[in-house]
Amino acid sequence: MNGLHLSRLTLSHFRSHQRAVIDCDARPIAIHGPNGAGKTNILEAVSLFSPGRGLRRASAEDMTRRSEALGWKLTGLLHAHGSLHEIEIWSEGGAARQLRIDGKAAAQTALGQIARVLWLIPAMDRLWIEGAEGRRRFLDRMTLSFLPDHAELSLSYDKAMRERNRLLKDMVREPSWYGALETRLAETGAAIHANRLQALEAIAAAQAEAQTAFPRADLTLICDMPTETQALRAALADSRRQDLAAGRTLIGPHRADLQGIYSDKGVAARDCSTGEQKALLVSLILANARALAGDIGAPPILLLDEVAAHLDATRRAALYDEIVALGAQAWMTGTGPELFDHIASRAQLLEVTEEDGGSRVGPLT
């Protein structure tokens, strides 16, 4: 296969791994071992090959191996769009992580132009029943996978909002202090909203065209704000009195929510069973991957942590079949090799065990 994949991953002093080298090919990778052995740490390392804070949203300091606290480093050989890139990611002394691509320093957002990485982790199982922040983050990860510039827009919007909120908390009433900030918020906010809608259209189309064992999830973006730049700027100016009382900005895409519906049943995702909610999430990740494969010519790297949880044997087998048909390099974890029996002959198996207070990574088979 010539699609997007890592052919080597090296972890040094990262989480529980003092040193691990994984040489692999583009096939799925099934990682098994006991709870706490360090399987998810490998997936977290791969997640850092895309923009953002990774699948745990951890600080650079939290990722260092505690016994040494020397800092950490990840390196990877990434095959993307017919080219081979050497990626180096590291942190020293708890400082913000640094990045080199092919020997040259780069911003984290540059990874979005090379790698597309999607993940599904157990913490997301409660996506539909917890707060809107997690759903916005889920939507923005999908959006970023299609539109790498979405990361820069989000950073610019967040910075402007923090500055405006500081003025609000300080009870600054002079309009001239707000003008430039509100212009930037309106420009980036309207673009963020448009990007999110574009991503949802791509997901809906991918689900409509697919033959899959997983239920379709109809997604709706709920956002009570003007969607045109000038109208949003005017709304921000009009809301200053209310925002001053609240001490924060009350209008904008940061207030949006994502609603999911189990299409065939017409039931809100939040009201579905635990197994149905998991199946809906799997369906969305697969739809995202299919849409990306059509958009950029290759499926993304998939990270599926404890993916067998809440999936019966039939759906587990269906998931593996879809991953193989998609041609994605999927990094999957589970407690035992029997969870991967249906895909074992089409995947690479990797065992992770605990050893001397850390993790030991066995050779791929």
Image (spheres, helix red, strand yellow):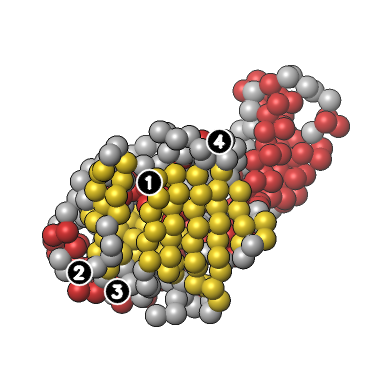
**How would you rate the neighbour count of disc 1 (Cα within 10 Å): few for under 14, some for 14-19, many for 20 or more?**
many
The image shows residue 91 at horizontal and vertical percentages of 56, 43
Compared to residue 360, the image places residue 182 above or below, namely above
Asked whether, in this view, residue 144 is left or right of residue 164, the answer is: left
Q: Quadrant of the N terminus?
A: bottom left
Asked whether, in this view, residue 135 is left or right of residue 356, the answer is: right
Q: Nearer the viewer, mark 3 or mark 4?
A: 4
The image shows residue 34 at horizontal and vertical percentages of 20, 46
Kindly indicate whether the residue at mark 2 contacts the one at mark 3 (C-beta within 8 angstroms): no
Identify which amino acid the numbered label 2 is placed on.
Ala
Mark identifier at residue 344: 2
Mark identifier at residue 324: 3
Mark identifier at residue 17: 1
Quarter location, residue 46: bottom left
Residue that carries the numbered disc 4 in the rendered image: 94
N-terminal label among 2 and 1:
1
Residue, x 81% and y 40% (percent of image)? 180
Q: Secondary structure at mark 2?
A: helix
Asked whether, in this view, residue 84 is left or right of residue 337, the answer is: right
Kindly indicate whether the residue at mark 1 contacts the one at mark 4 (C-beta within 8 angstroms): no
Q: Secondary structure at mark 4?
A: loop
Residue positioned most to the right: 176
Kindly indicate whether the residue at mark 1 contacts the one at mark 2 (C-beta within 8 angstroms): no
- Name the foreground residue: 35 vs 56: 35
Q: Secondary structure at mark 1?
A: strand
N-terminal label among 3 and 2:
3
Observer able to see residue 54? yes
N-terminal label among 4 and 2:
4
Q: CA distance from mark 4 to mark 1?
A: 17 Å
Kindly indicate whether the residue at mark 3 contacts the one at mark 1 (C-beta within 8 angstroms): no
